[in-house]
Each structure stands twice: as C-alpha cells, then as structure tokens.
Image (spheres, rainbow, N blue to C red):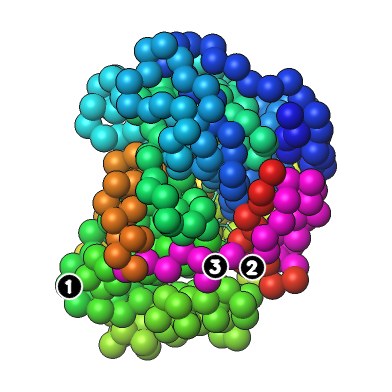
Amino acid sequence: MRAVTWQGTRKMSVDTVPDPEIVQQSDVVVKVSATAICGSDLHLYNHFVTTMQKGDILGHEFMGEVVEVGRDVKRLKKGDRVVVPFPISCGRCYYCKQGIFAACDNSNPNGEISEALYGAQAGAAAYGFSHMYGGYAGGQAEYVRVPYADVGPLKVPDGVSDEQVLFLSDILPTGWQAAKRGEIKPGDTVAVWGCGPVGYFTIQSAYLQGAERVIAIDRFPERLALARDVGKAEVINYEETDDLIELLKQMTGGRGPDVCIDAVGLEAHGHDLVSKTDKVKQTLRLEMDRPTAVRQTIQAAAKGGRVSIIGVYGGVIDKFPLGAFFTKGLKMAAGQCDVQQFMPDLLQRVLNGEIDTTSLISHRLTLEDAPDAYKMFCNKEDGCTKVVMKP
Ligand code: NAD
Ligand code: ZN
C-alpha cells in the first residue's frame, strides 16, 4: 500500500510499504477513506518529539471502512464505516474504566521511554506518533491496523460526509476537552490562544458550554477570520498590539478573562525577548518547549480563574510565572484528549448542526501530495487552515 513516511526533520515521503495485518484477534484493519494532518504532526515533522525512526508511518486523524476483523472483535463487522480516535486504549485498565482513555496503562509497549525522559508514567499510545508513544503505524496510508477495535472506533451513519465526521478522531473532541477543563460557568469570558484547528473547535465548544464571550488570539488573517465568522469570537491579532495582557484586561473590565486556554503548544511564536530566547534554547535543546502562550494565559487570567492547556508540551520550561499563578489563585489543567469519552455526544452535535466542521478545511488533497501539504500547513502558506487527504 501507499503511506506517508517520516524520513527526518522536515522530510516526508510517500512510499510503498507492506499492508497491515491482524496481529491480535481484537484488531481490525481499516481501509482509509479520509485522513488529515494535525498540528501535532508538525511537532514530529519539525522533530521536536523524540524517538522518531526513518520510515515511520504518520497520521492519527483518519476514518474509513472495516475490511478485516479479528476473531475476538464483537462490535464491528466488515463494511462498517468508522472514525478512529487517536489514543489507542485497551478499555479495561484502571484509567480506561474511568474514561481517562489517554492515560491507558496497556497500549504503550514503550512506556519506559517516557519514564526515563520525564520521570513520569507513560500515557496511552497513539497512531503514528513516535516510538515513545508506542511505535504504531499511522493513518496517513491506504490501510491501518486498529488494535482494541471494540474500544476505540466509532461507527458513523451513512448519509453524513467524511468531512463532517473525520475530526471526531481528534481536534473536535480536543477542542471540547480544552473548554471543559476550563470549567466554564455561564457568563464567563473565555480567551483562546491559537486559532488553528484546535482553537477553532475550542471556540465553538466554549460557547456551547456556556461562555458569554470568547476572545480568540492569533496572527494569521485567515485563521482569525474563521474564529470571527464561524466561531463568533472577538478576535485579536497579537502582532497589532504592544501589550496583549493589558488589552485583554481592558476588554474585560480590568479583570482579565475568567478562562484562558492555550491551543498553541510547544512551537509558539513570539516577538518579545523571552520568546526569542526560548527559540534559541529549543534549537540548542536546552529547553524542549517554547512556552509563550502558557506564560501569557497565566499572566492574563482573572483572579480565581482557570487555565487550560491543550497545546502539546514535551519537557521542562523556563520562566514559569509561578508567582502570578499563586497570587491569583488560579487552577490549571492539561493533557492529551480522552477522545473516546466525547465522541458519541459530539457526533450527535455534529448531526444536529450545532458544530461547524467543514469551514475549517482549506485544502483537499491526496496522499501523494503529503510532502508539499506538510510544508504548506507547517508554514501556514496559501491560507492553509486544514488539510484533508484521500488515499
Ligand atoms: P496549528 O499549528 O495549526 O495552530 C496553532 C496556532 O497557534 C497557529 O494558528 C499559530 O499562528 C498560533 N500561535 C502561535 N504562537 C501563538 C501565540 N504566541 N499566541 C497566539 N497564537 C499563536 O496547530 P493545531 O492543529 O491547532 O494544534 C494546536 C496545538 O494543539 C498543537 O500543539 C497540537 O499538538 C495540540 N493538540 C493537542 C491535542 C491534545 O490531545 N492535547 C490534540 C491535538 C492537537
Ligand atoms: Zn492530532
């Protein structure tokens, strides 16, 4: 089959590789009908996530048709149309039973890498996301092996397009969880850093969860336009203000937003001296993450407010404003999305027309276009807001 493979820093190719097979009898094989490039894939592309190997198949946002079924699979049969959540979760461990699927104890055979790197227990494995995350082949391919098939894949009805439901695999539940972890109360003002795909769904989720106002922050006009026109957010181009924190204060009666959400992650951009220093330190591997947005969410939040970090981070950071965090009595939450927990409810909301999933897509391409598509999405060229590919 054809598949998108990682060949080194900012080097992707499309290769012919062996077809996947059933390995455990609880697996299925899915024939991919649509797959997308995620902002998280860019962390692999730019090689900020370690333990990548040449030839690894990428992709954790995909859907398609079940074409092979292991003997022990009960919930799926050949021909079913499914969206597959990015975390690989056993469904039976202590964490999965509580719905914390991204913390699955069983799916990641390489957990010791996380323990050595972070001194922290590993989370669930994920498709196409480095060997530290299990080394599973991803879904930017014609076929994918899907383990624990009775747990993850969500069956979707005919009559709904791939584009309407594909993002249930990751960025829609991720935006939903970002808002949820902000514990939004009716009347709250929510500020969202980053108007990429995750920010796009965070904005919509914040309103559905009761926010009165959403303020969205980015610098790319096409992304800010989506946030404003589809998301109904008030938008700030942070390049057009000298003091973002002061502006947010002025917009909120001097208090700051009640909930501040980081939908940017470890490749944040920034002009100030500290952000530039972060970039140098990250390049030299002296600091793993560029935490501009993390710092700003803490600085901006109202007293007693909540900070929700959904952008991905991978190490230790400098200049964490602990004093501000403490003085204002903030609450903070972070983590990978427990996608499976939110999929059924969000499918209903998509079918009811409560959530816009398709305006985000700027480029509809094929797998063969992947190397150019990665470059374009990474550099935010050609107004690229989201790439969907068909094999
Ligand atoms: P993306 O790269 O398309 O979007 C990031 C956006 O942040 C860009 O529009 C960029 O201009 C903006 N940005 C950069 N620096 C900024 C700053 N200082 N202030 C405000 N905005 C800034 O990526 P995406 O697909 O939207 O993903 C965003 C993050 O979410 C990534 O780190 C990704 O890995 C992460 N993510 C996390 C999960 C999870 O489960 N926690 C799941 C999916 C994605
Ligand atoms: Zn993703």
* Residue picked out by circle 2: 362
Question: How busy is the neighbourhood of tag 2: few (under 14 within 10 Å), some, or many (20 plus)?
Answer: some
Dot 2 and dot 3 residues touching (CB under 8 Å): yes
Residue at 64% from the left image edge and 68% from the top image edge: 362
On the picture, is 229 further left or further right than 242?
left
Q: Disc 1 marks which amino acid?
A: Pro
Label 2 – label 1 distance at C-alpha: 33 Å
Label 3 vs label 1, nearer the camera: 3
- Residue 276, how many percent across, how many down? 69, 62
- In three-dimensional space, the C-alpha distance between marks 3 and 1, rounded to whole angstroms, equals 27 Å
Residue 186, numbered label:
1
- Asked if residue 223 is positioned above or below residue 67 in the image, the reply reads below
Position of 372 with respect to 278 (left or right) is right
162 or 300, nearer to the observer = 162
Instruction: Classify the position of the C terminus by image quarter.
Output: top right
Q: Are marks 2 and 1 in contact (CB under 8 Å)?
A: no
Is residue 237 rendered to the left or right of residue 103? right
What whole-number distance in Å separates the C-alpha atoms at marks 2 and 3?
Answer: 6 Å
In this view of the protein, can residue 371 be seen by the observer? yes
Q: Position of residue 232 (x, y in %)?
A: 40, 81
Give the extent of the magenta segment: 354-381
**Which residue type does callout 3 highlight?**
Leu
Whether the magenta-drawn stretch holds residue 271 is answered as no
SS class of the residue under badge 2?
loop
Q: Is residue 97 left or right of residue 338?
A: left
Residue at coordinates 52% horizontally, 71% vertically from top-left? 359
